[in-house]
Image (cartoon, rainbow, N blue to C red):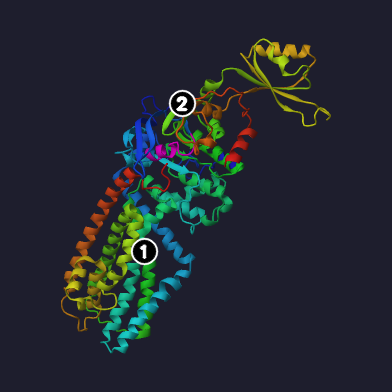
Amino acid sequence: MPDATQPTQPLAIDVRGIRRVYNVKPKPVVALDGVDLQVEPGEFFGLLGPNGAGKTTLIKILTTLLLPSEGTARIFGFDVERQTKQIRRIMNMVAGGEQSGYGILTVREQLWMFSQFYGLPSRDGWNRVDELIEAVGMEEQREQRVSTLSTGQRQRMNFARGLLNDPWIFFLDEPTLGLDVSAARAVRELILAWKAAVPGRTVLLTTHYMAEADELCDRIAIVDQGRILALGTPDELKRRVQRESLFRLELDRLDGGVDTLRALPGVVSANQVAADPSNGKGPRQTIDINLALVNDAALGDVVGALGGMGAHIRALRKSEPSLEDVFVELVGRGFDEAGESGPKDSTPRVRRQPPASTDTDDAREREVEVVG
Amino acid sequence: MSEIGGARRTEDAPGRNAFVYRPTASPQDAAYWSPRQVAMTNLRTVVGRAYPRVSGLFREKSWVFFEILLPFLATSAFVFVYRALQAPPQYIGFVVIGGAMTAFWLNVIWMMAQQLWWEKSQGNLELYFAAPMHIMAVLFGMAVGGFVMSSARAAAVLVIATTLFGVTFAIDQWLLLIGVFLLTLAALYGLGMVLASLFLMWGREAWHLTQLLVEPVYFVSGLNFPVGRLGVLGSVAISILPLAVGLDAMRQLAFADAAYPAGTPSPAVEAAILAGMVVVFLLAARWALATLERRARQEGRLSVRWQ
């Protein structure tokens, strides 16, 4: 858990019964519907949800850009409705795809201009800008016009802007939206390095990239249709859908097929995933099997039985459920379907098949790359 | 990106690096600013926001063509009309002053008034409101930047036209003339701030309204003739339009020897009217911005993305 700088310090974010309705035609849109949320100082907190879930609306309320229709919200004890000045002095924000500033200025000038809005003395502002340009790795673009920057460079510059005033709380609204894998990774590293520099710094991240939330966040709230459906650490959330121990086996052979495995004690299910593309004629035959066991202890019996059948285990990997599995279990649909679905069945449907493995960097990067 | 973790420390401030600029003990410490800090932040904001406009002057040279040469043609056209009609020579001067002041009026109506609306579409507006300075400081910065840009145009029109058309000024009260000029600008940009807040709220509707008003305002302000010629209408214009009253006062002061049409107040009275306008417009702008910020926060109009 994050370390608070003072034991009596108020919550970094304290949201009570927030509701936000947009009065648009043909009928009002309920963007937030009774949200309660408490974030400790020093926490890296994620709001995970599909487009239209209400994430940006909540961020806009917390950054004093929007008033709630009902409820209260406080940032480090300051009320978002009445104490906007205090909040604006201690926070900053960066949004994905942000095109702020003026294309005619160079990167250095643009950042200096924003430094003036936070009251940095002129000379300090230039020095600070140079430090941040170096920190975000934009030395080569220092004198380049903003209008000529690539999306990734622009987002790094936006991060430098967001850090100009040493915020205590940093709001990030889909910060890696549209970035390629390496740019997104650079941005994530930057956030973590900044946060680690001072205890008590708090980050609220909204994203619909689940791997990103999994990697960065201490706790996550899964949001959909203006409501928080689940809240906890990534591991806690995943445990909610993990009813069995899941393994992926790579075998050289399996006489009798997967039915042999299903008959073993402690095995809930066994499914062959992919046959060897060489169809057994290649130099190396592999049989991949997804195995669901009642618990981890049942694995010993399975391994022993496979040895008795003359099968050799080439690889064994435990499969963890992903946050996507959590979302699907809670909502009954995936993120990609979110925008297309109409009024939903409110009863969560349980996904029974073993989730795909996502616990590698490659898997995360693939997801970010495809979605972004 | 190995440099990310290795933010360098500056020699002049031990313990500081890119990720730690102004260490504060707690968020509460950082949230309370002294009145001096508040004032200095607003002052720096004025300078910071003026910077893009001023630096833009030297980067996009096309403004010389669009902002000086083209408007100069319009001014010249009236000069030739007055010459053809054998109007008193001071009328050439009236047109030249009107041409110079047009630069400021256009700056206010086309750039200042629409600026917040434009900033919103660019995504800058929410960053302005999320920063700790007063939004009036941003508008002041825009005004200063616009003033510098428009002054270049006004000066160019004044110098070129005076030289080409042989305008002779007869100025008895230099200080009052300078004072009226500055008051006119202050009132004009104050009006621009009020309009900016209206644009923020009504956006496209306000744009259309402005389009509708441009030519009538040109006419009743007397950009190309003494507003006194309009009789009652001119008097009304003088009481509500800073451009009309400022122009009239400057013409009276710059051409003291002219047979000026009766029916308009003396320059001193007009200076007092302008001073009143400055106060009213600035207070109105402050009130309108605060009110409209609250309404915009209620209705979600500060940003383009709203969900």
Quarter of the image that includes the C terminus of chain A? top right
Q: Position of residue A302 (x, y in %)?
A: 70, 13
In front: A298, or A136? Answer: A298
Q: From this view, report whether residue B242 is shown above or below residue A131.
A: below
- Mark 1 lies on a secondary structure that is helix
Q: Are marks 1 and 2 in contact (CB under 8 Å)?
A: no
Q: Residues within 10 Å of mark 1 (few under 14, many from 20)?
A: some
In front: A181, or B45? Answer: A181
Q: Residue A363's quadrant in the figure?
A: top right
Residue A336: assigned label: none
Q: Residues within 10 Å of mark 2 (few under 14, many from 20)?
A: some
Q: Position of residue A2 (x, y in %)?
A: 47, 26
Q: Which residue is mark 2?
A: A230
Q: Amino acid at mark 2?
A: Ala
- Subunit of label 1: B
Q: From this view, report whether residue A161 is shown above or below residue B277.
A: above
**How many tags in the picture?**
2
Residue range corresponding to the magenta coloring? A49-61
Queried whether the magenta region covers residue A59, the answer comes back as: yes
User: Which residue is painted at 79% across and 20% down in the image?
Assistant: A253
In front: B227, or A92? Answer: B227
Q: With B99 as the anchor, is B250 left or right in this view?
A: left
Queried whether the magenta region covers residue A190, the answer comes back as: no
Task: State how far apart marks 1 and 2 are (Cα).
Answer: 50 Å
Residue A144 seen from this side: no
Q: With B121 as the anchor, is A193 left or right in this view?
A: right
Q: Residue A299's quadrant in the figure?
A: top right
Q: Which residue is mark 1?
A: B110
Q: Amino acid at mark 1?
A: Trp
